[in-house]
Image (spheres, grey):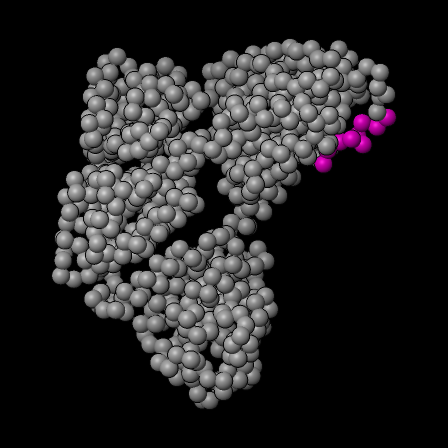
Amino acid sequence: MPDPRPAGDRRALVYEQAGAWWDVLPVAVLVLDGGGRIVQWAMAAGDLLGYTPEEVLGRDSTDFVLPEGHAAARSLREAVAAGRSSTGSFPVRHKTGLTVQLEVWACPVAGAGRQGRDSMLWLAADAREAQSTHGGRALPEGWFSGSPVGLAVLDTDLRFQQINPALEAMNGVPASAHLGRRLAEVLPGVNSEQMEAAMRRVLDTGEPVVNFRRIGRTPSDPHRDRVWSCSYFRLDDRAGRPLGISASIVDITADQRDDVDSATTRRRVTILNEATLRVGSTLDVARTGQELADLTVPRLADIVTVDVLRTVTEAAEPLAGLAAGAALRRLGKAPAYGSVVADVLAPVGRILHFPAVAPYAQALVDRRPYLLAHVDARAVAPAARYTSTPDRIRRLGVHSLMMVPLIARGLVLGVATFLRADEPTAFDSADLALAGDLAAHAAICIDNARLYHREHDTALTLQRSMLPRRPQAPAGMEIAHCYRPASDVNEIGGDWYDATEIAPDRAALVIGDVMGHGITAAAVMGQMRTTVRALSRLDLPPDQLLDHLDHAMQELDDPLLATCLYAVCDTSTHRCRFARAGHPPPAVITPDGTARLLDLPPGAPLGIGGITYTTTEVAFPPGSLLVLYTDGLIEARGYDLDERLSELIDLLGHTGQAPPGLCDTLVTHLAATPAEDDIAILIARIGTPEGSPRPADPDSLAGR
């Protein structure tokens, strides 16, 4: 299930980089079209006011403003419509009926609305919390106007829409001269082509680019080069389409070790920027190692190898100890072939073993970069005791060498080795500093990939261990089920299903989805399933069971919201009673092949409290198929939900398959690739079609 704050992790980084107090204060993001209607409801908007996106999208923003705040809200909208950023405070109605005083900062966003119409971006927070967080200073004004970090909002054409005073001072160009213009038009003296390439990557992929370097001269200091660290983050609409870029800029000139006026620093910045874009492009450990090798040949070295401790690629904790020596796996090598020197070195994938006292292992133990400016027989003698390779490559022309450990989050992961043979000049301290920065970036990317796969595997194992392997169904009911995890670790965790026999001719069917993802959501899912199993034995009406489950969700140590659909089916009468807590509606296929969605009261997600659920009874012809699913099956970026539901019904009406095959068909035809969210499906045949033989062994038809 999507996070209740769409694209939350990415936007949270935006505000963190921008200096907002995101870690202590929830901030809601709203985008309004030119008419003031809400077209995006993101970040903490649902937490702050209690409404889901479906309840607010398309409605006028002032529908939620209490009468005494209408004037202030309209004034804010009018100011933004006139092209000015503005702040305001007014009372808003929470879904529960309570009043929330909001502090709002708003700015225009050109061309982000439908048909390219102008829109407005609102950032909102609870006014009382904002004031207590920062000594009475309103959050939105402090976030943007008062931040010492340079901040900007650009549209999808990379034209400035808004900048703050700090960036205005950095650039030495008035804010009015930025608006509507691209970077090269405003600051021709910086590496704008590289920067726009980075921003376009963010727009294309949605992945942030952090610590990208800008170098050059601006009107604020036209006589010398300066260096800035830039971070770019994409802002999306609810369908996942990009609205533009949020940028933060910090002057780091004083932190540079080299003279910023030198060609060395320009070369350094260019390579580091390329590393930001090219190294770590995927969460793949091996690919990251090869990307580092490819980037640095021939820009920095003639031959490069990248090796990591074998434990890094085997989901174990790195650097468990090197007393017995080091075993490393070669992740990258450039050139891969066609070089006499490179051909002497072990290929990618090979496991290399080094005694603890060997120089290669010592580089890992010492955790320091190592420069051997001139390689001669004396220099390679210590290593030659363990392998003939160093002396062989020396004889083939290698005359200078650097070894740089790969260290991330205090852990030593491996080592990158840089060799020069064709390039006549030796490595120097500037080269070593550059290699250190490149290795540090690559190490973080490798460790991110390692942690990603470890958490992905842990969450998936936990999730699968808590799902029933063979749900039991009474005679007269055939069951199939399937679960497909998301491809992203952040999406795994909350989807589940179960079937429990209540009496010889009655069974409880349930499917649910915990909001949130990862290990926490998987653990809460397990608690939900256990609770439902216990409550179903009491033979409660579906609405009462959901009410008890709602109370149980509120009492969790780490409360989360969840959707749920609970049904009690009687195979003798072919009648089912349903209750729904914010979950997608079930579908039914009657024996004549007709498919439709069941019109059930939607209810509200579990964990909110104070909600009344409704039981609805439906009669089915014998042999009807009941299809329960989670929203990962029907939600997809860029597609309307109603269209997806129509596609589901059309597919169900034309398959004519038994439950096990139908599960596969639904996943094959409807699920996104790669999977953006977990998918759970539970299909039950209620009774046997008239004139059909009864299955001798219902369990033989159980799903996987």
Residue stretch in magenta: 696-704
Instruction: Indicate whether residue 10 is drawn in magenta.
Output: no
Can you see residue 21? yes
Q: Position of residue 339 (x, y in %)?
A: 51, 76
Question: Is 346 above or below relative to 592?
Answer: below
**Of the pair 652 and 362, the residue shown nearer to us:** 652
**Of the pair 407 and 254, the residue shown nearer to us:** 254
Which residue is farthest bottom? 377
**Residue shown at 25% from the left, 32% from the top:** 107
Which residue is farthest front? 115
Question: Is 163 above or below relative to 290?
Answer: above
**Residue shown at 33% from the left, 21% from the top:** 37
Total marks shown come to 0
Q: Where is residue 234 in the image (x, y as percent from the top left)?
A: 37, 41
**Of the pair 195 and 628, the residue shown nearer to us:** 195
Q: Quadrant of the C terminus?
A: top right
**Residue shown at 76% from the left, 22% from the top:** 477
**Of the pair 458 and 650, the residue shown nearer to us:** 650
Question: Is 628 above or below relative to 177?
Answer: above
Instruction: Indicate whether residue 702 is drawn in magenta.
Output: yes
